[in-house]
Image (cartoon, rainbow, N blue to C red):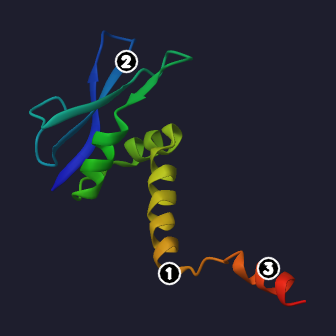
């Protein structure tokens, strides 16, 4: 199974994490498939950078984020945009648009 998870880098007492895609059986700091972002918990601004296109790609092909990465993706707004996009596509196919012709026909017939 493919996971989206964190890899710790940085010196002692100054953690810095890379968000990456890896096989679930590889070790935490071992072999990985692709780096899709970074997270610096000690920085106040700009501490989270994620490549949204790659994250969406890996989520769409079935990669499972860990709990921490899921919360980071939620904080970055990626999961919300992904959810809204999926609902928007479904709404377009199932919803019937209200046409303005009903208002025009009512005005011309009166």
Q: Secondary structure at mark 1?
A: helix
In the displayed structure image, the side of residue 13 where residue 11 appears, left or right: left
Q: Secondary structure at mark 3?
A: helix
104 to 75, vertically: above or below: below
Q: Position of residue 32 (x, y in %)?
A: 13, 35
For residue 107, the mark is none
Q: Residues within 10 Å of mark 2 (few under 14, many from 20)?
A: few
Read off the residue under disc 1: 94
Q: Pick the residue in front: 60 or 93.
A: 93
Dividing the picture into quadrants, the one containing residue 26 is top left
**Residue depicted at x 47% and y 58%:** 85
Q: Secondary structure at mark 2?
A: loop
In the displayed structure image, the side of residue 110 where residue 78 appears, left or right: left
Q: Pick the residue in front: 20 or 87.
A: 87
Question: Distance from label 2 to label 3 (Cα)?
Answer: 62 Å
Q: Residues within 10 Å of mark 3 (few under 14, many from 20)?
A: few
77 to 89, vertically: above or below: above
Dividing the picture into quadrants, the one containing residue 110 is bottom right
Query: Is tag 3's residue or tag 1's residue first in the polypeptide sequence?
Result: 1
Q: Position of residue 36 (x, y in %)?
A: 27, 33
31 to 89, vertically: above or below: above
The outermost residue toward the top is 11
**Residue depicted at x 45% and y 45%:** 78
Question: Distance from label 3 to label 1 (Cα)?
Answer: 23 Å
For residue 15, the mark is 2
**Residue depicted at x 67% and y 77%:** 99
For residue 103, the mark is 3
Q: Pick the residue in front: 88 or 9.
A: 88
Query: Is tag 2's residue or tag 1's residue first in the polypeptide sequence?
Result: 2
Q: Pick the residue in front: 104 or 98.
A: 104
Q: Give the total of numbered labels.
A: 3
């Amino acid at each position: 199974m493919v996971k989206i998870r964190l890899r710790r880098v940085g010196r002692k007492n100054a953690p810095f994490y890379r968000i990456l895609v890896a096989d679930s059986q590889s070790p935490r700091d071992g072999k990985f498939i692709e780096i899709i972002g970074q997270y610096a918990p000690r920085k106040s601004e700009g501490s989270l950078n994620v490549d949204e296109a790659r994250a969406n790609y890996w989520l769409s092909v079935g990669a499972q984020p860990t709990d921490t990465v899921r919360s980071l993706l939620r904080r970055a707004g990626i999961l919300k945009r992904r959810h809204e996009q999926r609902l928007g596509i479904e709404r377009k196919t199932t919803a019937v648009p209200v046409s303005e012709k009903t208002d025009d026909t009512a005005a011309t017939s009166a």
